[in-house]
């Protein structure tokens, strides 16, 4: 006689087992209008790892990662975000606009009322660094990589071709448009102008992380005033969205 028995799985009329298709679900970036929050049943999946999941980012104030400010603002439209900005002892005299880059925060709520913690620490680091799971996750380095991760929280679905294009534009924006030579920047602007002549956004008909990172790169390189016609139109489309204005305030 065995110690215990379980029913066999498979065949013979066994009960069907529905396996999950992803670790957790979050709402689409282009969900309800009017800045409505996510479906509680979906947003609750962010709690799978604990009462409050914390994102902690170290960044150098000499070159603020504008794309992360845009993404923070977008996340605030979909989740209850507990935001904080701190200054590490390795830096001095951080400008006031950087200390208030997340705006005024509601300090009357208790911690358990939030879905996501978002802490930005101005620190003397060579490139932005992020941790999502403080105890178990290796740091994510680089503005482009962090932006990809944050945008993934919106749960957009793309086919492999689109995903490859998005990744390519993010890398191009960081390594050529933002950090490349004048010849490289000119070539990127021509490529962007061509792509934006076929669709309103860099990849298809929806805003993606590629648009956010590319727009921020143009702003930080001072190239935004001399761009081709399609790129100029696209930049205005970006700036018509409130989260981009949060980043513009850091450039003043």
Image (cartoon, rainbow, N blue to C red):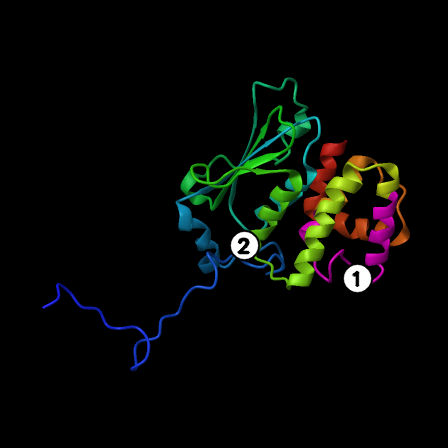
Label 1 neighbour load within 10 Å: few <14, some 14-19, many 20+: some
- Total number of numbered labels? 2
Residue occupying image coordinates x 56% and y 37% = 130
x and y percentages locating residue 93 in the rendered image: 66, 18
Q: Residue at the far front: name it.
A: 1
Magenta segment boundaries in residue numbering: 186-212
Q: Residue at x 65, y 32 (%)?
A: 127
Evaluate whether residue 158 shows in this view: yes
Magenta stretch contains residue 203: yes
Q: What is the quadrant of the N terminus in the image? A: bottom left
Q: Where is mark 2, residue-wise?
A: 37
Q: Is residue 221 left or right of residue 170?
A: right
Q: Is residue 233 visible?
A: no
Q: Quadrant of the C terminus?
A: top right
| Left or right of 84 on screen, residue 50 | left
Q: Nearer the viewer, mark 2 or mark 1?
A: 1
Q: Which numbered circle lies on residue 199?
A: 1
Q: CA distance from mark 2 to mark 1?
A: 28 Å
Tell me the element at label 1.
Answer: loop
Picture layout, residue 7 above or below residue 26:
below
Q: Residues within 10 Å of mark 2 (few under 14, many from 20)?
A: some
Percent of width and height locating residue 123: 60, 25
Among numbered discs 2 and 1, the one appearing first in the sequence: 2
Q: Are marks 2 and 1 in contact (CB under 8 Å)?
A: no
Pinpoint residue 192: horizontal percent, then vertical percent: 82, 52
Task: Specify whether residue 205 is painted magenta.
Answer: yes
Q: Where's residue 49, x and y in %? A: 41, 47
Q: Residue furthest left?
A: 1
Left-right relation of 148 to 19: right
Of all residues, the one furthest to the bottom in this rendering is: 12
Residue in the picture at 65% in, 39% down:
143
Q: Nearer the viewer, residue 157 or 3?
A: 3
């Amino acid at each position: 006689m065995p110690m215990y028995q379980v029913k066999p799985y498979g065949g013979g009329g066994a009960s069907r087992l529905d396996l999950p298709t992803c670790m957790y679900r979050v709402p689409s970036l282009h969900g309800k209008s009017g800045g409505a929050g996510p479906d509680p049943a979906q947003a609750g999946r962010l709690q799978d790892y604990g009462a409050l999941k914390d994102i902690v980012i170290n960044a150098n104030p000499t070159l603020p990662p504008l794309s992360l400010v845009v993404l923070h603002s977008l996340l605030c439209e979909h989740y209850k975000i507990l935001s904080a900005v701190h200054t590490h002892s390795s830096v001095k005299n951080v400008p006031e606009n950087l200390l208030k880059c997340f705006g005024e925060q509601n300090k009357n709520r208790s911690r358990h009322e939030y879905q996501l913690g978002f802490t930005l620490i101005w620190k003397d680091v060579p490139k932005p660094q992020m941790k999502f799971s403080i105890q178990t996750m290796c740091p994510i380095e680089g503005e482009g990589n962090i932006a990809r991760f944050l945008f993934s929280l919106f749960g957009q679905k793309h086919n492999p071709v689109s995903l490859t294009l998005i990744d390519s534009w993010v890398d191009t924006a960081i390594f050529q448009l933002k950090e490349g030579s004048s010849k490289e920047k000119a070539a990127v602007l021509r490529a962007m102008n061509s792509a934006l002549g076929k669709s309103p956004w860099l990849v298809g008909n929806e805003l993606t992380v590629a648009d956010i990172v590319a727009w921020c790169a143009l702003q930080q390189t001072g190239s935004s005033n001399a761009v081709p016609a399609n790129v100029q139109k696209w930049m205005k489309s970006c700036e018509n969205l409130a989260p981009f204005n949060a980043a513009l305030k850091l450039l003043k």
